[in-house]
Image: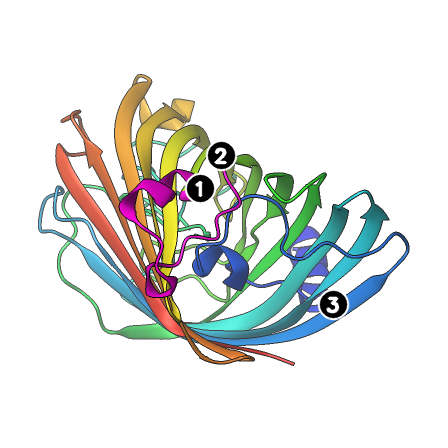
Amino acid sequence: MFRSRLALLALLLSPFASISPAEAHGSHGGSGEALEAGEFDFSPLVVIEGGGGFDINLEDSPKHYSLGGSLGGVFTWGLGNGANLSIEASIGPSLVWGEAEHFYGKVHAHDHDDHDDHDHEDDHDDHAHDHDDHDDHDHGHGHGHGHDTDYKRTDIRGFLQIKYAPNDRLDFAISWLPYYVTKDQGDDIKGLKNELGAKMTWAFGDGDVDFALGDSFSDLVDGIFVSLDHRQGWESDGMWVGNYTDPRLGIGFKYDKLNVRLDGGPRLYVPGSYSGLDQRTDFAAELSLSYELSEKTELFAQWQQTHSWEDAPGWGEGWQHHIHTGVSFSF
């Protein structure tokens, strides 16, 4: 109980957010405009967002929805020679319909009475997060769940990311995505879910491809990038859900104020021992759009898709989808 309260206190005292608006808007390679050595910049961020998960490959095609917002900001320091170091963080509520967001690939397991003082025979759905990237935000559920998408409660979700960009084409980032379930309800267990990630992105070109300015199809090479993303997930009772690694090839371009990013590749998934399932390779992709309403305001939308060829207990063959949309304000 003390550990649970301590974790909640740490979450509430830190400016975390569930997904990074920068990731949501499809940026890649580097960390934006480089600052001079020793120069400092801070940009407050407010994000209002909503999303839905659609696991149509599973029995009863379970769905869940969320609506919320976050408050935070981005600190950036110039390191010289075009290098930047940034810290992005924020926190916000998440209104839940159906069930909590959850780490990719978690299955509905049975006969785990010996796990962390809970009876998990009926207490686990597959909870996955996001972000983006959230960031971050593909989903897996267990068989036998219906279409209960009634409003449940308000949870708290967060995001913390540290990013180093040695130049405008390469960046390295580590992230923590905490998600606090505010009470036991259905398959959700009160406590702090955790997701840790590490990501590398390298852009082939400067990414400044804008068809509205006369760029041609051949200029798309400047928008191609590759990324490698690794993530680990834990349930709110401390159970390790598993990990996955996403090597991806992507492309980004603009048309006037519309920013488009598309990427995809294999997802190398290692489920936790609780599931009794073997390692597998799925397919994951994401389409991100953002539209600049003004210098400080952007609309964004994400469509994340995953496909599994594995039909196993607690899992299913076919597609899963997650859609996320919202508006961000910087100051």
Name the residue beneath numbered marker 3. Answer: 13
Residue type indicated by callout 2: Phe
CA neighbours of label 2 inside 10 A, class few (<14), some (14 to 19), many (20+): some
Q: CA distance from mark 1 to mark 2?
A: 6 Å
Q: Secondary structure at mark 3?
A: loop
Camera sees residue 314: no
Query: Taking 110 as reference, is 124 above or below it?
Result: below
**Residue 237 location (% of width, % of height):** 51, 45
Q: Which residue is mark 2?
A: 204
Mark yes or no: residue 226 visible. Answer: yes
Residue 282: x and y, percent?
Answer: 26, 28
Q: Which residue is mark 1?
A: 222
Q: Which residues are magenta?
A: 204-223
Task: Write the residue at 78% across / 57% down.
Answer: 35
Nearer-N-terminus badge (2/3): 3
Q: CA distance from mark 3 to mark 1?
A: 41 Å
